[in-house]
Amino acid sequence: MTEDARKTFDVYADDYDVALARGISVSGEKKDYFAQRRIEWLRDCLKLFSAPVRNLMDFGCGTGSSSRLFFDILGIEYFVGMDQSEKSLEIARREHSSTRSQYLLFDAYQPCGQFDLVFCNGVFHHIPPLDRAAAVDYILRSLRPGGLFAFWENNPWNPGTRYVMSRIPFDRDAITLSSPEARQVLRLGGFEVLRTDFLFIFPRILHWCRWIEPLCSRLPLGTQYQVLSRKP
């Protein structure tokens, strides 16, 4: 992220959830629904690759609201949340700290190949395109050999995505990236791409259709996508 982006998230740290809720309210769901569903989807993907996860980095953790879900759903033992916004990290430490978690600025951590899994949601559209390779390299160096990277981003091919982002102040000027662009960035950064899945097609008013979503996950229909990749 740029210095301007860091300042933006410092400004919105206290009201981040409120601003996000306004944006996604058109879906009829709250952010917890999306957070839980993302991590449940990741859990099921990890089972396919028989990939046990003991320690996890959340790259761009914000205020740390997803940290509990990593413990509850993935069953991890240790968690590190990384972010560039000190104000957001202060909130994360205050509200989600435990003996099994830590919240650090990116500059405070030297990648050393210790993590089984790095998770990242909606961060790269805030990173200038020319800086994305450096971010991918930081993540690669943070993972052990064979470690996995769960890269979640907003799908710019979905008109609903663009509408929701236009309603969120800190997303209006974001530079989105499509799933092919994401896969290219990851491959060029040294990752082996394992699979790409799209999620969140139907709003709450059509929740009775959601059973179809897993069957359509390879089609670029959902408002978000996950590219799961592995460090060789």
Image: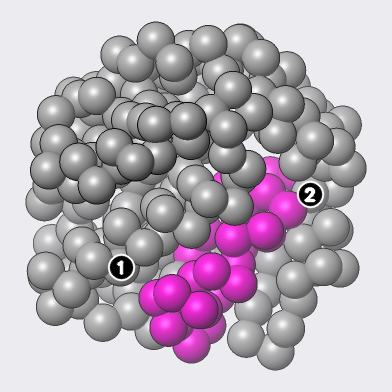
Q: Is residue 119 visible?
A: no
Mark toward the viewer: 2 or 1: 1
Q: Nearer the viewer, residue 137 or 63?
A: 63
Q: Residue at x 53, y 11 (%)?
A: 163
Relative to 164, does residue 196 appear above or below in the rendering? below
Q: Position of residue 67 (x, y in %)?
A: 60, 67
Q: Residue at x 40, y 76 (%)?
A: 74
Q: Quadrant of residue 8 in the image?
A: top right
Q: Quadrant of the N terminus?
A: top right
Residue 214 shown in magenta: no
Instruction: Give the label on residue 43, or none.
Output: 1
Q: Nearer the viewer, residue 18 or 94?
A: 18
Q: Position of residue 187 (x, y in %)?
A: 16, 39
Q: Residue at x 45, y 19 (%)?
A: 161
Q: Which residue is mark 2?
A: 88
The span picked out in magenta is 57-85
Relative side of 145 to 126, left or right: left
Q: Quadrant of residue 220 in the image?
A: top left
Relative side of 170 to 29, left or right: right
Q: Quadrant of the C terminus?
A: bottom left
Q: Residue at x 70, y 34 (%)?
A: 21
